[in-house]
């Protein structure tokens, strides 16, 4: 379990990977801690989410963005991800579609499939699924006709080898919690 220590100013020491290897610790300011705590939860659904986050933390939008960038530069934050709660967003049908794409056509095919507004994710998978399905797309529809939509996508990308894996249940989605 990760060891965490607080100094007399309430700053929390949390080692990065390189510092763990060297046995060193880093110090996070209170603002950095608050931003990290906020980022591990839901980011405000707002046209300017970092301004809304800053307002909640009594910081400016520029300060929030600067601190996030500094934390990324230091390797403390590696990515910020978003979770789409499909059913809450009004989607009636969701499916992962796996495609067999020749390596020479991977980039153009990925761009074609990603251009469909119904596609939220499009990525190459290595190693391939079942030895041949190497491009994955997540498709979301507000109407229950996934087969026709996927046929249209296949035609646009000139593909005929794919599988549709329909989502029948939406499972709980949660992020890692490092700060409480």
Image (spheres, grey):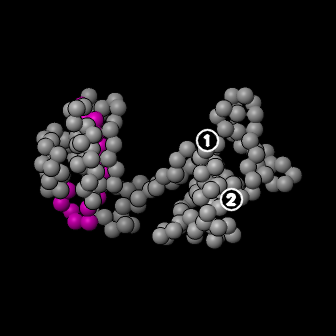
Mark 2 Cα-neighbour bin, 10 Å: few <14, some 14–19, many ≥20: some
Q: Quadrant of residue 50?
A: bottom right
Q: Position of residue 122 (x, y in %)?
A: 32, 47
Please identify the quadrant where the N terminus is shown.
top right
User: Which label number is shown at residue 34?
Assistant: 2
**Eye-nearest disc, 2 or 1:** 1
Is residue 146 shown in magenta? yes
What residue did someone put label 1 on? Answer: 75
| Rendered residue at 84%/49% (across/down) | 7
| Rendered residue at 27%/40% (across/down) | 107
User: In this view of the protein, which residue sits in the foreground, 9 or 107?
Assistant: 107
Dot 1 falls on a residue whose secondary structure is loop
Q: Position of residue 12 (x, y in %)?
A: 76, 49
| Rendered residue at 69%/28% (across/down) | 21
Q: Quadrant of residue 130?
A: top left
Please identify the quadrant where the C terminus is shown.
bottom right
**Vertically, is 143 above or below 4?**
below
Q: Quadrant of residue 139?
A: bottom left
Q: Is residue 95 left or right of residue 33?
A: left
Dot 2 falls on a residue whose secondary structure is helix
Q: Position of residue 152 (x, y in %)?
A: 14, 53
Q: How many marks?
A: 2
| Rendered residue at 51%/68% (across/down) | 48
Q: Is residue 57 left or right of residue 173?
A: right
User: Marks 2 and 1, how far apart in space?
Assistant: 17 Å
User: Which label number is shown at residue 47?
Assistant: none
Q: Position of residue 82 (x, y in %)?
A: 46, 55
Range of magenta residues: 132-147
Q: Is residue 177 left or right of residue 149?
A: right
Q: Can you see residue 139?
A: no
């Amino acid at each position: 379990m990760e060891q965490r220590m607080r100094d007399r100013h309430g700053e929390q020491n949390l080692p990065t990977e390189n510092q763990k290897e060297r046995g060193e610790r880093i110090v996070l300011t209170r603002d950095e801690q608050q931003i990290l705590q906020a980022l591990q939860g839901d980011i405000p659904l707002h046209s300017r989410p970092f301004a809304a986050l800053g307002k909640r933390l009594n910081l400016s939008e520029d300060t929030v963005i600067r601190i996030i960038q500094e934390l990324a530069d230091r390797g403390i934050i590696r990515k910020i991800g978003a979770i789409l709660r499909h059913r809450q967003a009004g989607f009636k049908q969701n499916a992962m579609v796996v495609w067999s794409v020749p390596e020479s056509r991977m980039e153009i095919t990925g761009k074609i499939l990603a251009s469909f507004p119904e596609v939220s994710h499009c990525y190459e998978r290595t190693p391939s699924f079942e030895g041949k399905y190497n491009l994955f797309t997540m498709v979301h529809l507000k109407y229950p006709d996934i087969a026709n939509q996927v046929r249209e996508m296949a035609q646009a990308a000139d593909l005929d080898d794919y599988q549709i894996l329909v989502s029948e249940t939406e499972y709980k989605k949660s992020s890692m919690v490092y700060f409480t």
